Amino acid sequence: MTQCARVVAALFISTVGTFIMAQDSSGGHLVIVGGGLRPDNRAVFEKLVEFAGGPEAARFVVLPTASVSTVDSYDVCKYLMTYGVAAERSEVLLVTQQNAATSVADEAILAKVRAATGVFLSGGDQRRLVRLLTKADGSDTPLLAEIRNVYARGGVIGGTSAGASAQSATMLAVSGLHDLLIDEGLDSLDFGITSHTDQRGLLLTQGFGFFKSGIVDQHFTQFRGRLGRLTRATADSGVPFGFGIDENTALLVASDGPIQIAGAGAVTIVKPGEARGVDGPCGFKISDVSVSMLSAGDTFDPVSGAVTIDPIKPLLVREKAEYDGNFLINDIAGGGAVPFALVAGLAENTAEVQESLSIKFHGSYMHGYRYTFRKRPTTKAYGGIIDEKWTYSVVDVQLDIVPIATGLEPAEKHRPVDVPEGELGEALTAIAFRGVMPVDQQHRFRPDDAITRGEFACALARSAHLPASHLASPSIQDLDKEKFETAEIRRVVASGWMQLDAAQRFQPDSKVSGSDAATALKKLVAMGAPSTDADMAKKLETLQNLGDEPVTRSQIGQLLFGILLPSLKK
């Protein structure tokens, strides 16, 4: 992590308050669910009701505010009935995007929250949830203030998916991206903390701050790339722990005690080492990350870092390991890959190391990251039957992440051979490694070549989250439908960033003019691309003034570096 990135992260943390390791000194509880809560999850629902005062005394209000639908919120009320909460003692409060401006101060709604012993925040988009329940200056609306009072007087705050992420002080805000094909883990490792959802990288914002022990991520081993995303978020923000919660699984958090795991899946706890990572032109690297995967009945103390394993799961010993040797895990970002690495690769294996990869290719060029999971002297693994299912817990595995490029070699071996020394060369190297403007098969960036329309369109598509739908894109007559780059060009055209000619041709091999390049790059900046370069507007105007004159790959590479990776500047 560069000094500049550390300053940015420190400034961000200062806006959300100083982290403390223990929860608030109220008598309240939190039930933080990783999404996909099933109605038959007795362990979670019974605790939710217990923390609200028991079936006879509990009174719940459910907020659908994060979602565009109220269906799931009404389902929560229905599920609570099966656990003894009478129908008249749970209610959906219709605080939505359409009416939040007035409903967050509606006295009738506030009175219902005052009478409640439990609040449940449904899933959806955590950005929407926080935006609607806080004022423009980040302070509480009357509704959020009353929700805090429920917790302060000993009630329970529950939440699932978006309602889980929003409970932490530093919130992972990325959700609902236009491009669901994006591997957010690889994206986070490549681009670090950004300032806008549509920009490549990792967006961290202010959450509600009920949960103060770390960052919450949800749908953790079900969705792509969550380990890389949570590792980078935790490392860059300076937060002590990251908690990745599986679907149908929950953290049960008491204000004065350790955190308990409940439900069907696992919670992955990430703790970066002292170094907290180093960013550079050839990618992000981090070592000595502690990764633990806990399951039902286990507890974690965020003050001491101590883990207590449910005694029903005995310690696993090497002599009885099921496997002997390293697995080939070529997509650690895939669903279920991380538990497989920790359990089959290490807990049930005599091997000391489990190697795995997260890669992305751009034509003949490939880049990504090697994840190495390693047993330490302190690593322990446990397994036993809980709820008629064999369940594992793995404690304190070391994780190292290093960047790689074509041939799975260290990224440094694939620096462009034809870029100059100094800041310009480092900028072009950074853009090349991340596949925005990759090198050719001879490792050449070709900085002095005029950039083609096809190359420029691909670079734009790799610089922002553009809509993925092909339906909005007109038919393009001169593109090969089977080429990898065609889908990227279609996105750029559909977004209006580049135009077709009168014959509906894109002309991918033609040179890009300065005016066309400037017009598209201004749109990229307007999306919210973070730029610390005070001269960016002037540089784009200079480009615009070139008119029909072609521009070089070096010129475009420098500008994209300034837009996408300002934290790497010295």
Image (spheres, grey):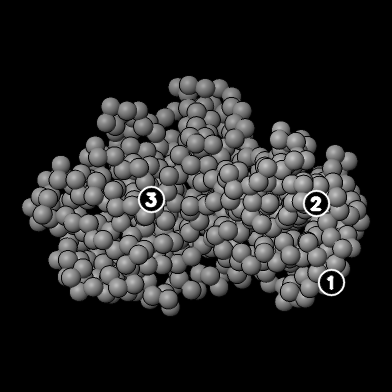
Q: Are marks 1 and 3 in contact (CB under 8 Å)?
A: no
Which residue type does callout 1 highlight? Answer: Asn
Q: Earlier in the sequence, mark 1 or mark 3?
A: 3
Disc 3: which residue: 161
Q: Give above or below for 163 relative to 11.
A: above
Specify the label residue 375 is tagged with: none
Q: CA distance from mark 2 to mark 3?
A: 41 Å
Which residue type does callout 3 highlight? Answer: Ser
Image quarter in which the N terminus is found? bottom right
Image quarter in which the C terminus is found? bottom right
Q: Give above or below for 228 relative to 107.
A: above
Q: Earlier in the sequence, mark 2 or mark 1?
A: 2
Disc 2: which residue: 453
Q: Secondary structure at mark 2?
A: helix
Q: Can I make out residue 335 in this image?
A: yes
Q: Secondary structure at mark 1?
A: loop
Relative image position of residue 357 (x, y in whole percent) = 63, 37
